[in-house]
């Protein structure tokens, strides 16, 4: 596997508590970075951060990426605890309902846009 040197780098991964975000976090940790997992599910993100401790420095930050004040607060928390943010992975997202595009409810589409 290609090894990327991310020693001393701090990576923020939105939606980092599970799925693709978790896989990205594992890869970043294996490459030497510390990670700040941003997710709106407090219990899950805290459990995930604990499960990654053997791989490196991982912290859990509860954040709603659709809320600017929440993002600002998470940014300050991460910068205070880690010193900087070197890498940002915008992974958070939702798929919404599985329907034909012309049947997609506009309010559901807006949630998808807001999340990503």
Image: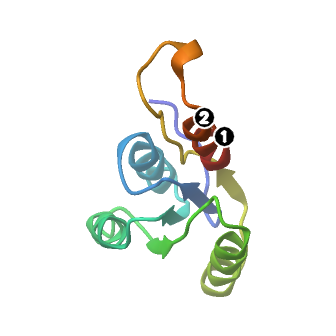
Across and down, in percent, residue 58 comes to 44, 69
Across and down, in percent, residue 70 comes to 64, 74
**Residue under numbered circle 2:** 109
78 vs 20, left or right, is: right
Across and down, in percent, residue 6 comes to 61, 54
Q: Residue shown at 55%/69% (left/top)?
A: 63
49 vs 32, left or right, is: left
Q: Is residue 15 above or below residue 91?
A: below
- Answer few, some or many: residues within 10 Å of disc 2's Cα (few below 14, many 20 plus, some between 14 and 19): some
Q: Residue furthest bottom?
A: 80
Q: Residue shown at 49%/73% (left/top)?
A: 62
**Residue under numbered circle 1:** 113
Residue toward you, 14 or 66 = 66
Q: Secondary structure at mark 1?
A: helix
Question: Which tag is nearer the camera, tag 2 or tag 1?
Answer: 2
Where, by quadrant of the figure, is residue 7 drawn? bottom right
Residue toward you, 44 or 106 = 106
Residue toward you, 27 or 45 = 45
Across and down, in percent, residue 86 comes to 73, 61
Numbered badge on residue 51: none
Where, by quadrant of the figure, is residue 109 drawn? top right
Identify the colour scheme used. rainbow
**Alpha carbon distance from label 2 to label 1:** 6 Å
**Contact, mark 2 vs mark 1 (Cβ under 8 Å):** yes
86 vs 38, left or right, is: right
- Answer few, some or many: residues within 10 Å of disc 1's Cα (few below 14, many 20 plus, some between 14 and 19): few
Q: Secondary structure at mark 2?
A: helix
Q: What is the quadrant of the N terminus in the image?
A: top left
């Amino acid at each position: 596997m290609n090894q990327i040197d991310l020693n001393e780098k701090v990576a923020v991964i939105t939606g980092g508590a599970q799925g693709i975000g978790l896989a990205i976090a594992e890869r970043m940790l294996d490459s030497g970075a510390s990670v700040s997992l941003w997710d709106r599910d407090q219990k899950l993100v805290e459990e995930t951060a604990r499960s990654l401790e053997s791989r490196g420095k991982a912290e859990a930050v509860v954040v709603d990426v659709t809320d600017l004040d929440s993002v600002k607060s998470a940014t300050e928390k991460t910068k205070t605890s880690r010193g900087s943010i070197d890498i940002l992975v915008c992974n958070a997202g939702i798929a919404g309902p599985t329907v034909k595009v012309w049947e997609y409810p506009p309010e559901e589409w807006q949630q998808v846009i807001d999340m990503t």
